[in-house]
Amino acid sequence: MSTPIVEIRNVAFAYSGDSVIKDVSLNIWPEDYIAMIGPNGGGKTTLLKLILGLLKPDTGVIRVMGQSTQKASSCIGYVPQDVHINRSFPITALDLVLMGKLAPKKRWARNSASNRREAMAALEQLEMAPRATKKIGELSGGQLQRVFIARALVTKPKLLLLDEPTASIDTKGQADFFKLLGELNKDLGILVVSHDLLAISRYVKSVACVNKGLHYHKQAEITGDMLETMYPCTDEEWCPVELVAHGLPHRVLKNH
Amino acid sequence: MIDALQFEFMRNALVAGLLASVICGIMGTLVVVNRIVFLSGGIAHAAYGGIGLAFYFGWPYLPSTIGFSLIAAMVMAAVSLKAKHRADTIIGVIWALGMAFGIILLDLTPGYNVDLMSYLFGSILTVPKSDIMIMLFMGVLISILVAYYYKDLLALSYDEEFAQIRGVHVKGLYFALIGMLAVTIVMVIQVVGLILVIALLTIPPFIVEKHAKSLVQMMVGSSLLGSLFTITGLWLSYRYNLTSGASIIMVSGVAFLISMVIERMELYSRIKNK
């Protein structure tokens, strides 16, 4: 564990003059399971795009596996926020997963048998193998979500990035979903974005609050049962929240 | 239909129509899934400016038309990448300007009168052999290019962001796609006319999309369906002495309506069965 998967150092980014991310530093390690939370417009998605190399930081450095983000973007499996876009597109679950095997310089329409096997294995891991030949329009939101994760997994990533993956899943589904990620976390690091400040599963090991800046809460800190406190996520705004839950565990963050 | 084929012009018309159907089936699939139907319309109309240039300056017809449409298409592609929310407006402007520019140049060309109707509806019944050879060559070239870049095109069409992360040169590929589209449109318009090109680019892929499980299936299905429309339309135009291009489009339009009705009925019966 000498180098982190992702190393973010003093990164700032602005969209046409409007500062979105300011002085963010974070290391992500292979064993991490981080939930990234924060208000809408707080810069969560921007930070993801910076890590993926889709955007370039104005100042500061981001390194992935010690390389530049452009070069190393294949080390990161990405599950986009909106899986419902293009629902009517003529593509099967299996072909969608095979898209993860896309590599420059490998042309022609045919997919190799080994790629197909890998794609099927990824679908199997996510219990989606029986639906491999279904068109994506015939799958439910939760099923499609799993297919997208399978697509991210066949890229053999060191880190899985998920942007608000639970938006289209009901509460029971969400619990299962975070558990599933917990399973995957045995093999790779996970960074999951959520705008839902309260719905963070106990499988999550640490929490990063993003609102322009970033506050990182380690495991030890967030297991404290401080039910009487509030849920602060920003320096300026305080969101008083009453936690209602049946039984433990609960998780409350200290003041920044 | 068989007795119609004893005329050479009917045989040529049939072959030209089938080739146009196949080319439009392949490109139309990419047009429909990438939602660039409006952009295709823009290219097709702006190409008229190229025709005007060719006649006014006495330049060779095909190179100047293709050159002009390529430039117009690249501008439209750049705008649709840079300013997505304003793209349709800018395309509309180029669409209208290109067409007007062409017509004014033709007005200024002394002693020449190009028939606008033949540009719109083509002259499929007077297609020379040389045009058929050009279309055949184009069809083969497009098939090879699309097969070679298939995975990249699929990723670009379905999930541009993911394609970029996987190392696909998204912008270059997009410009290449639009460029290929511009060349295709100009060549096929020559033969079957602007209106039929738009119809063949959109109607068959739209009908097939719901039933296809992959882009390849959609391309093959659209080509077959377009061919069926072409054959039926040509037969009707021969039998009842109608304009051939318009007949093919009417057949496509009726098929489009029928597919919509069938889809509605399926939806209705599914709801009822629940």
Image (cartoon, coloured by chain):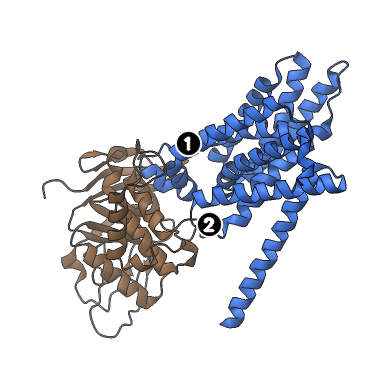
**Can residue A163 be seen at all in this image of the molecule?**
no
Chain letter of the residue carrying label 2? B
Q: Nearer the viewer, residue A193 or A212?
A: A193
Chain letter of the residue carrying label 1? B
SS at mark 1 in the image = helix
Q: Are marks 2 and 1 in contact (CB under 8 Å)?
A: no
Q: In which quadrant of the rendered view does residue B76 lie?
A: top right
Q: Which residue is mark 1?
A: B173
In the displayed structure, does residue A57 sit left or right of residue A27? right
- Give the image location of residue A207, x and y in percent: 26, 62
Q: What colour is chain B?
A: blue
The residue positioned 54% from the left and 38% from the top of the image is B82
If you read the primary sequence from the N terminus, does the residue marked by circle 2 or circle 1 appear first?
A: 1
- Give the image location of residue A17, x and y in percent: 46, 41
Q: Which residue is mark 2?
A: B212
- Give the image location of residue B9, x and y in percent: 77, 33
Q: Nearer the viewer, residue A35 or A96?
A: A96
Q: Amino acid at mark 1?
A: Leu
Q: What colour is chain A?
A: brown
